[in-house]
C-alpha cells in the first residue's frame, strides 16, 4: 500500500487504533495473522512487547547501570514500553471518541428504536436522499461528469474537493470513484481515520491532537473557549454546524454516543474528560460548506 509507505502517521492510526506509538517505525510487513486476515499489514497483531523484549533492551543498553554510568537505576525497559505503547485507558477513550463520532454520523436510531437510540450506529453508509450532487467548481479537484459527491463513509465525506483530498491521502481515486466509499468498509474506515488524524488547515490541530492532549491552545483559542477534550474534536470536524450554538441536539447526540461507548467498553463515562461539549466554542474555521456537513 503506497499510502502506508508514504505516511507512517496513517499506518499508525490504522494499525494501532488511533494511538501514536513507536511501533510505527516498524517495518511494514504483510502478515496472515489474527482474526479473518490474509496478506495485509493490518493483520499484524503483534505488539512491541512481542518483538522487542527485555533481553534485547538489556543488550542494547548493557552498561547503563555500570558504576560509572550517570543515571544508574533510572532507565528501564518497562518505562520504554509504556512510553512507546501509551496508556491503555487513554487509547480506549480515543477509540470511544472516534467511534462516537462515527456512530452518531451513521446512526438510524431514533426515539423509540429497540435497544435505545444509541444502539444504531453504523446503520447507514451513505446519505439516503441527497438534495444535490455536491459539486463545487474547483480547479484542483474538478467534478467527474456523472459522479455524485453526496455523503458517504463512516465520517461521511461530502463535496468533490473533499473526495479529492481524501483520495490523494489514501492513494485511491475517489474523485473519479466516490462510490468506493460505500462499497468498501475498510476504505470507509481508513478515510474516517485519516480525517480524525489530519488537521483541516495548516497550523491547526487534528481531532486526534485536541483529544489526546498534543495541542496547546493559544491565547486566541482560550478566548474562543476552545480547550482540549471531546468538545474540541467536534469543533475540528464540524465547526459551527455543531459548535457555538448552545446545547443543540446534534451536539448532545455525539456526546451521548461517546459516553455510551465508554460505558460499553468498560472505561466508564467518568473518564469522558474535561471540556466535553463545544456549546460555547467559537469554531476553528468559520463555516461555509467547506467540510462534511
Ligand atoms: C495474535 O494472533 C495469533 C494468531 O492468530 C493469536 O494466537 C494470538 O492470540 C493473537 N494475539 C493477540 C494479542 O491478539
Ligand atoms: C492513563 O490515562 C488515564 C486517563 O487519562 C489516567 O487517569 C491514568 O492516570 C493514566 N495512567 C497512567 C499509567 O499514566
Ligand atoms: C478495500 O479497500 C482496501 C483499503 O484501501 C483495499 O486494500 C482493498 O483491496 C479494497 N477491497 C476491494 C474489494 O476493493
Ligand atoms: C486572534 O483572533 C483575532 C480575532 O478573531 C484574529 O484577527 C487574529 O488573527 C487571531 N490571531 C491568531 C494568531 O490567530
Image: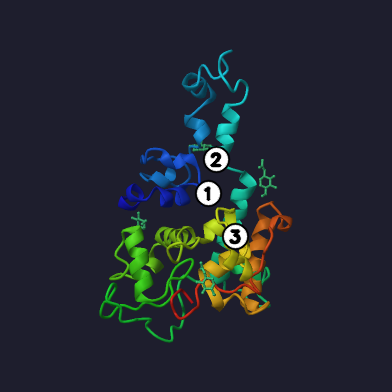
**Who's the residue at 66% across and 73% down the image?**
252
Mark 2 or mark 1: whose residue is earlier in sequence: 1
**Who's the residue at 40% across and 86% down the image?**
132
Q: Judge by depth and name the residue closer to the eye, 189 or 37.
A: 189
- Are discs 2 and 1 less than 8 Å apart at CB? yes
Q: Cα distance, mark 2 to mark 1?
A: 8 Å
Mark 2 or mark 3: whose residue is earlier in sequence: 2
Q: Which of the 4 quarters of the picture holds residue 168?
A: bottom left
Q: Judge by depth and name the residue closer to the eye, 262 or 224.
A: 224
Residue 226 location, x and y as percent?
Answer: 61, 67
The residue carrying mark 3 is: 97
Q: Judge by depth and name the residue closer to the eye, 109 or 249.
A: 249
User: Mark 3 Cα within 10 Å, few/some/many (few <14, many 20+)?
Assistant: many
91, above or below 246, in the image: above
- Residue at the extreme bottom: 131
**Can you tell me whether the CB of the residue at mark 2 lies under 8 Å from the nearest atom of ligand 2?**
no
Residue 107 location, x and y as percent?
Answer: 57, 71
**Who's the residue at 41% across and 38% down the image?**
26
Q: Cα distance, mark 2 to mark 3?
A: 19 Å
Residue 250 location, x and y as percent?
Answer: 61, 76
Judged from the image, the secondary structure of the residue bearing numbered disc 3 is helix
Residue 233 showing in the rendered view: yes
**Who's the residue at 46% across and 79% down the image?**
128
User: Mark 2 Cα within 10 Å, few/some/many (few <14, many 20+)?
Assistant: some
81, above or below 132, in the image: above
User: Mark 1 Cα within 10 Å, few/some/many (few <14, many 20+)?
Assistant: many
Residue 225 showing in the rendered view: no
- Residue at the extreme right: 270
The residue carrying mark 2 is: 85
The residue carrying mark 1 is: 19
In the rendered structure, find residue 275 and report the number of the disc placed on it: none
Judged from the image, the secondary structure of the residue bearing numbered disc 2 is helix
Amino acid at each position: 500500500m503506497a499510502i502506508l509507505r508514504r505516511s507512517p502517521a496513517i499506518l499508525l492510526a490504522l494499525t494501532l487504533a488511533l494511538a501514536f506509538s513507536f511501533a510505527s517505525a516498524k517495518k511494514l510487513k504483510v502478515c496472515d495473522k489474527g482474526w479473518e486476515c490474509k496478506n495485509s499489514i493490518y493483520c499484524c497483531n503483534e505488539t512491541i512487547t512481542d518483538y522487542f523484549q527485555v533481553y534485547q533492551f538489556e543488550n542494547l543498553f548493557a552498561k547503563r547501570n555500570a558504576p560509572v554510568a550517570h543515571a544508574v537505576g533510572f532507565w528501564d525497559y518497562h518505562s520504554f514500553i509504556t512510553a512507546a505503547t501509551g496508556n491503555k485507558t487513554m487509547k480506549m477513550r480515543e477509540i470511544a471518541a472516534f467511534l462516537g463520532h462515527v456512530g452518531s454520523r451513521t446512526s438510524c436510531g431514533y426515539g423509540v428504536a429497540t435497544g435505545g437510540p444509541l444502539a444504531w450506529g453504523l446503520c447507514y453508509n451513505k446519505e439516503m436522499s441527497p438534495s444535490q450532487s455536491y459539486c463545487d467548481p474547483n480547479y484542483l479537484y474538478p467534478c467527474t461528469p456523472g459522479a455524485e459527491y453526496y455523503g458517504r463513509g463512516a465520517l461521511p465525506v461530502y463535496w468533490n474537493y473533499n473526495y479529492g483530498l481524501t483520495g490523494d491521502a489514501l492513494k485511491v481515486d475517489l474523485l473519479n470513484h466516490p462510490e468506493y466509499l460505500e462499497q468498501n468498509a475498510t476504505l470507509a474506515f481508513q478515510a474516517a481515520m485519516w480525517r480524525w488524524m489530519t488537521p483541516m488547515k495548516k497550523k491547526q490541530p487534528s481531532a486526534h491532537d485536541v483529544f489526546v492532549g498534543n495541542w496547546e491552545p493559544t491565547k486566541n483559542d482560550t478566548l474562543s473557549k476552545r480547550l482540549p477534550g471531546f468538545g474540541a474534536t467536534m469543533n475540528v470536524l464540524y465547526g459551527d454546524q455543531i459548535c457555538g450554538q448552545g446545547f443543540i441536539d446534534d451536539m448532545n447526540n455525539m456526546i451521548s454516543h461517546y459516553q455510551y461507548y465508554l460505558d460499553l467498553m468498560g472505561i466508564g463515562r467518568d473518564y469522558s474528560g474535561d471540556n466535553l461539549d463545544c456549546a460555547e466554542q467559537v469554531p476553528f474555521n468559520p463555516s461555509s460548506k467547506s467540510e462534511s456537513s
